[in-house]
Each structure stands twice: as structure tokens, then as C-alpha cells.
């Protein structure tokens, strides 16, 4: 009995010691998107998000990340576009105010390069998403993760009705991020 | 000498006529399209028409540049005898303003697109570089300028057409005929 308890405790402490919580520096972090309308890029961002990051390159199996994005704060370079993105046909922020990305599977693909597989929930759709990122300036106290992924807006129902067609607004949207965090 | 590319002392050549009528069609179409599309609510159709408007606008900017080069290396035919000093001044002033407008319309449109953060794609073949960074105040400024210059264009084009018709039907000179395609005055 005593041995089992010790074993459980040691598991618990080992886990927490290896993939500790990181704290994001919001001023130096960003999540941005690049969509395409009429063959030309439209950019914007998600300036407000929370991140729970338990990540360690030495313990990828014990790493997990949860990012919650406040969609009420979505911005686009054009005011009318920012407003439109919040409406029912797009993100419907009144009903679905948050987007959530949860990843628990990480693989190292090259030096400083990783791939995360997780689920992204936007509106009422949960879709598996793979994203690639690099880990720069990594130390025990600070790290910068930079990465991107390509999303299909129609997989989430972003752009309903007439907007579903992809001749004017393309289906593919690139999401890029820079997350700076400290411990 | 039935087919003249270059202008002569009394006649426009076919290159000048081609530029004139191509621009006439494009500019009138663009003014109508601009007035129509700006009133639409934000929709795929609106974006599609804006895309078309921007694409044609970029082509107009290229053509007006070629047209001006042609104009400067190819003097216009002389005005008919018997015009008053005021008529000569009015004709040349309206022409200068029309040329300026053909430049300023696409240029303010391009600046406005850059300031909005909606770059100009030319029919999907290539995208124009942004002249300025997205900026709300500049976007408002160039949108307002684009709008006022459009109204000025409508006024000046009306004057230009009325003057041409007056020369043809009242003065009975060759001013209108010498710009008509397939017509030798």
C-alpha cells in the first residue's frame, strides 16, 4: 500500500516537474489570420486569448496546451470586415464567443521544430487540426513558439449562406502565431 | 494614307482614337459600377464587384500612362479657325482636367485599397504592391477624394460631350467627326 502511494506521488511530481506551466506575455504574443478575397490577402488578428501551456521538449508525452480565443475582439484591417466577422453568418460571437484549441499530442520533426495535433472548436464544430511550430530562444525560463496552420473556414461553418461559396472568399485561411512565454 | 496611326495637323490617328474610345467606355462603365457597388450591403456580390472595379482600374492606370506618352509625343490636331479665346481656354482646361482625373481616379482607388488593407488584385493574375499601410484616417481621406473626383469626372465628361455635340450640330465643324472611328473628316 505504502509503495503504491509513493509510486503515485512520484508519478504526479515527475509529471509536474517536467512539463510545467508557462505564462504567456500578451504584449509580445499574437495570433493572426490571412484570408483571401478576390485573389488578394485580407489580414486580421485575435488580440485577446488565454493560454494554458504545459510544454517541455524533454517531455512531449506529458505536454498539453489549451488556447482560448476571445472572438469578440477579432480584428481585420477593414472596419466593415471586423464587424461582419462577428455576425451570425461568420463567427456568431453572440452565440459562440470563444474559439478553443486543445492539443495533447506533440512530435519533434526537426531541430527546434515540432508538430502539434489537437482539436479546434469554433462555433459548434470541433475539427482536428495539425500545426507546425518552431521553438526559439528556449531556456528553462523563457521560450518563443512560432507557427502556423492552414484551416478550412467551411469546415467550421465560418461564412454561411452566400458566403459559403469560395470564389470570392477562399476556403483556406492561414493562421499564424507567435507565443512568448516565461516561467 | 487611309490608315494613319499618328495624328496629323487636322486629324486624329487611329492610336489616339483607340485610346479615346477605350477610355470612354471604361471610364463611363467604372463610374456607373462605382456608384452602384458602393451602395450595396456587405456581401459576396459586393466584394466581387469591388474586385472587378479594382482590376479594371489597374488596367486604366496602365492605359492612361501609355495614352499620355502617346499624347506628349503626338501633338493633337489643331483647333478649327474662328474659336474665341474663351473656347480655346475652356477646351484645353477641360482636357487637362480629364487627363488628371484619368490618373487620379485609379491612383486614389489604389491608395484607398492599400489604406483599407484590401490590396488590388488584377483579375487574379497579379497583386499590386500596397502604396501605404492600413490606416483609418488615410482610408477615409482617399475614399472621400475618390468619391469627389468621381463627381467631378461626371461633370467634366458631361461638359466634354455637350461641347462635342455643340460643335457638330451648331457650329457644324469637324471637331466631333475627327475623333470618330472609321470616319475621315
Image (cartoon, helix red, strand yellow):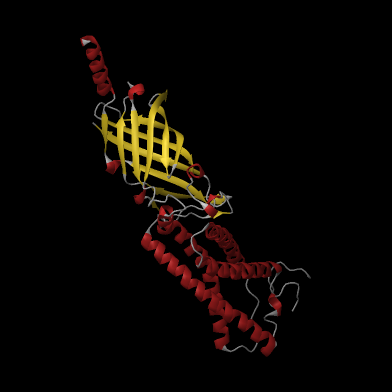
Task: Using the image as rendered, state which of residue A136 and residue A1 is in the foreground.
Answer: A1
State the image coordinates of residue B33 (x, y, percent, origin top left). 57, 67
Q: Left or right of B162: which side holds A95? A: left
Front position in the image: B48 or A163 = A163
Query: Is residue B80 in view?
Result: no
Residue A75 percent across, percent down from the top left = 38, 51
Image coordinates of residue B13 in percent, x first then y, are 70, 70
Residue in view at x 50 percent, y 68 percent: B39
For the point 58% across and 66% down, the residue is: B68
- Viewed as shown, does residue A26 lie left or right of A167? left
Q: In the image, is A70 to the left or to the right of A3?
A: right
Pick whichever, A51 or A89, lies toward us. Answer: A89
- Which residue is pictured at 58% across the width and 59% down the height? B52
Q: Is residue A11 above or below residue A43?
A: above
Residue toward you, B169 or B11:
B169
In which quadrant of the rendered image does the N terminus of chain B lie? bottom right
Q: Is residue A138 visible in the rendered structure shown here? A: yes
Going 40% across and 57% down the picture, which residue do you hit? A83
Q: Is residue A143 above or below residue A176?
A: above
Specify the farthest residue to the right.
Answer: B2
Looking at the rendered image, the quarter that the C terminus of chain B falls into is bottom right
Work out which residue is located at the far front of the displayed protein and give it.
Answer: A1
In the shown orientation, is residue B40 left or right of residue A103?
Answer: right
Up the image or down, B63 lies above or below B183; here it is above
Q: How many marks?
A: 0
Using the image, determine if residue A138 lies above or below residue B22.
above
- Residue B132 at what x, y percent from top left? 42, 56
Amino acid at each position: 500500500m505504502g509503495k503504491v502511494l509513493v509510486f503515485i506521488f512520484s508519478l504526479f511530481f515527475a509529471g509536474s516537474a517536467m512539463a510545467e506551466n508557462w505564462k504567456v506575455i500578451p504584449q509580445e504574443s499574437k495570433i493572426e489570420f490571412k484570408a483571401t478575397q478576390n485573389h488578394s490577402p485580407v489580414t486580421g488578428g485575435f488580440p485577446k486569448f488565454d493560454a494554458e501551456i504545459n510544454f517541455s521538449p524533454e517531455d512531449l508525452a506529458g505536454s498539453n496546451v489549451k488556447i482560448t480565443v476571445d472572438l469578440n475582439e477579432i480584428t481585420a484591417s477593414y472596419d466593415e470586415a471586423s464587424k461582419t466577422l462577428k455576425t451570425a453568418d461568420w463567427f456568431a460571437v453572440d452565440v459562440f464567443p470563444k474559439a478553443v484549441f486543445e492539443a495533447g499530442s506533440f512530435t519533434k520533426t526537426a531541430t527546434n521544430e515540432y508538430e502539434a495535433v489537437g482539436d479546434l472548436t469554433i462555433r459548434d464544430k470541433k475539427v482536428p487540426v495539425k500545426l507546425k511550430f518552431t521553438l526559439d530562444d528556449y531556456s528553462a525560463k523563457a521560450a518563443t513558439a512560432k507557427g502556423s496552420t492552414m484551416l478550412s473556414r467551411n469546415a467550421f461553418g465560418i461564412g454561411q449562406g452566400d458566403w459559403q461559396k469560395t470564389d470570392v472568399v477562399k476556403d483556406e485561411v492561414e493562421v499564424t502565431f507567435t507565443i512568448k512565454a516565461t516561467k | 494614307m487611309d490608315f494613319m496611326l499618328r495624328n496629323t495637323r487636322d486629324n486624329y490617328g487611329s492610336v489616339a482614337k483607340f485610346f479615346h474610345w477605350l477610355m470612354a467606355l471604361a471610364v463611363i462603365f467604372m463610374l456607373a459600377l462605382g456608384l452602384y457597388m458602393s451602395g450595396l450591403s456587405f456581401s459576396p456580390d459586393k466584394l466581387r464587384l469591388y474586385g472587378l472595379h479594382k482590376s479594371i482600374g489597374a488596367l486604366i492606370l496602365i492605359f492612361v500612362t501609355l495614352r499620355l506618352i502617346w499624347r506628349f509625343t503626338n501633338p493633337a490636331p489643331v483647333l478649327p479657325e474662328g474659336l474665341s479665346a474663351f473656347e480655346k481656354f475652356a477646351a484645353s482646361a477641360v482636357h487637362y482636367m480629364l487627363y488628371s482625373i484619368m490618373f487620379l481616379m485609379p491612383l486614389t482607388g489604389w491608395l484607398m485599397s492599400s489604406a483599407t488593407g484590401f490590396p488590388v488584385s488584377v483579375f487574379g493574375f497579379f497583386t499590386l504592391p500596397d502604396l501605404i499601410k492600413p490606416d483609418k484616417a488615410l482610408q477615409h481621406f482617399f475614399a472621400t477624394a475618390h468619391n469627389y473626383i468621381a463627381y467631378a469626372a461626371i461633370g467634366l465628361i458631361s461638359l466634354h460631350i455637350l461641347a462635342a455635340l455643340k460643335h457638330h450640330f451648331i457650329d457644324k465643324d469637324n471637331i466631333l467627326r475627327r475623333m470618330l472611328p472609321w470616319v475621315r473628316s
